Image (cartoon, rainbow, N blue to C red):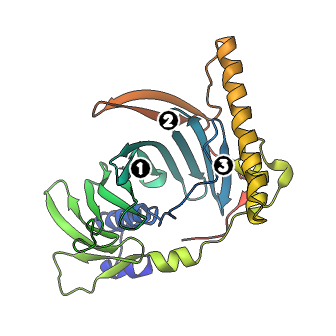
């Protein structure tokens, strides 16, 4: 992000700082579209499963709040930097014979508390193709809006055509608009798995600034480490799937399959038990409600706690 400062040689409180913050959020949003590995997933979402991890002073908590449909909720807080993220993700697959389009419903919110700014954004669609070769791509339109600053980003994720002759592979293009004047102030261009740049439309002579380098960022990713085994919750995904993970690492596929089947059977028994008692499952860390968007019933998730506590699992990678 250092190169972004070239757009604001004398960053000062007010519009310059607000624009810089908005660009940083746009870059972060693009960075969440990671390359997806094509193949069979050894893990399935388990109702009530959690993942609790810390990165410096940023503490993140995820919970699987629904199984049918699949809904995951995220809450992240950084008390030192006065940052909060609330994110719900509901996947709805649509089958088209030669491909599967996964629509991701749910709202992402990032709050910069000290600045009184709230950024709201959506997620692109995931396209899984089977012919002529297996592939995965993020496609579709994403909007990022901050009502307090009056800034809006419109991004379009595209892929190559069916036969690979047209389009641009893993491309992201878009613009940042000042909604008060309805004028485009920056243009965004690049590839979300490599380099994304931004250009000031009022100064075409200004060098484009790199706001995200996917190859560099992904090369720095490290596996999170368990720093406090006793602090792990029984619902922690790393605990739930530990035997399956160990078997996969040992390439003992038969044992991995057996361990996975045991988890699924236990989940079915819990469902039967709740049904016999007339009980509904209630998320532990989130309140959920339902709303209708474009004729689809979509879950909205709000955290029950104000701050996410430090986690026993630590990630030391800073992007």
- Residue of label 3: 51
Which residue is at a point 28% across and 69% down the rendered structure image?
160
Place residue 282 in its image quadrant: top right
Q: Quadrant of the C terminus?
A: bottom right
Q: Residue at x 32, y 52 (%)?
A: 146
| Residue 205 position (above or below residue 45) | below
281 on left or right of 99: right
Q: Quadrant of residue 72?
A: top right
- Nearest the camera: 86 or 277? 277
Q: Nearer the viewer, mark 3 or mark 1?
A: 3
Residue 170 pos. (x, y %): 35, 70
Q: Nearer the viewer, mark 2 or mark 1?
A: 2
Which residue in the protein does label 1 denote?
A: 116
Q: In this orientation, does residue 203 appear?
A: yes
Q: Which residue is mark 2?
A: 301
Label 1 crowding class (10 Å Cα cut-off): few <14, some 14-19, many 20+?
Answer: few
Circle 2 SS class: strand
Q: Give the Cα distance between marks 3 and 1.
A: 28 Å
Return the residue found at the far right.
Answer: 230
Residue at coordinates 38% horizontally, 63% vertically from top-left?
137
Q: Residue 258, position in %: x, y? A: 76, 47
Mark sitting earlier along the chain (2/3) = 3
């Amino acid at each position: 992000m250092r190169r972004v400062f070239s757009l604001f040689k004398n960053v000062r409180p007010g519009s310059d700082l607000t624009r810089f913050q908005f660009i940083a959020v746009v870059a972060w949003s693009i960075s969440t579209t990671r390359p997806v590995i094509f193949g069979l997933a050894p893990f399935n979402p388990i109702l009530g499963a959690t993942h609790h991890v810390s990165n410096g002073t940023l503490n993140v908590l995820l919970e699987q709040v629904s199984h049918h449909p699949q809904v995951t909720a995220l809450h992240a807080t950084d008390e030192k930097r006065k940052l909060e993220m609330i994110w719900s993700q509901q996947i709805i697959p649509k089958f088209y014979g030669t491909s599967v389009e996964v629509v991701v419903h749910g709202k992402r919110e990032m709050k910069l508390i000290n600045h009184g700014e709230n950024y709201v954004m959506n997620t692109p669609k995931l396209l899984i193709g089977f012919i002529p070769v297996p592939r995965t791509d993020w496609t579709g339109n994403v909007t990022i809006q901050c009502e307090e600053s009056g800034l809006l980003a419109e991004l379009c994720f595209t892929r190559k055509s069916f036969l690979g002759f047209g389009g641009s592979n893993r491309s992201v293009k878009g613009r940042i608009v000042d909604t008060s004047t309805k004028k485009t102030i920056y243009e965004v261009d690049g590839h979300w798995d490599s380099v994304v740049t931004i250009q000031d439309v009022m100064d075409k002579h200004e060098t484009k600034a790199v706001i995200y380098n996917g190859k560099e960022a992904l090369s720095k990713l490290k596996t999170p480490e368990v720093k406090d085994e006793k602090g792990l919750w029984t619902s922690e995904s790393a605990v739930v799937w530990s035997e399956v993970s160990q078997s996969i690492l040992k390439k003992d596929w038969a044992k991995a399959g057996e361990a996975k089947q045991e988890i699924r059977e236990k989940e079915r028994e819990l469902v039967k038990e709740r049904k016999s008692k007339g009980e509904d499952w209630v998320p532990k860390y989130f309140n959920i409600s339902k709303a209708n968007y474009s004729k689809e019933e979509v879950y909205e998730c709000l955290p029950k706690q104000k701050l996410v506590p430090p986690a026993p699992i630590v990630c030391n990678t800073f992007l």
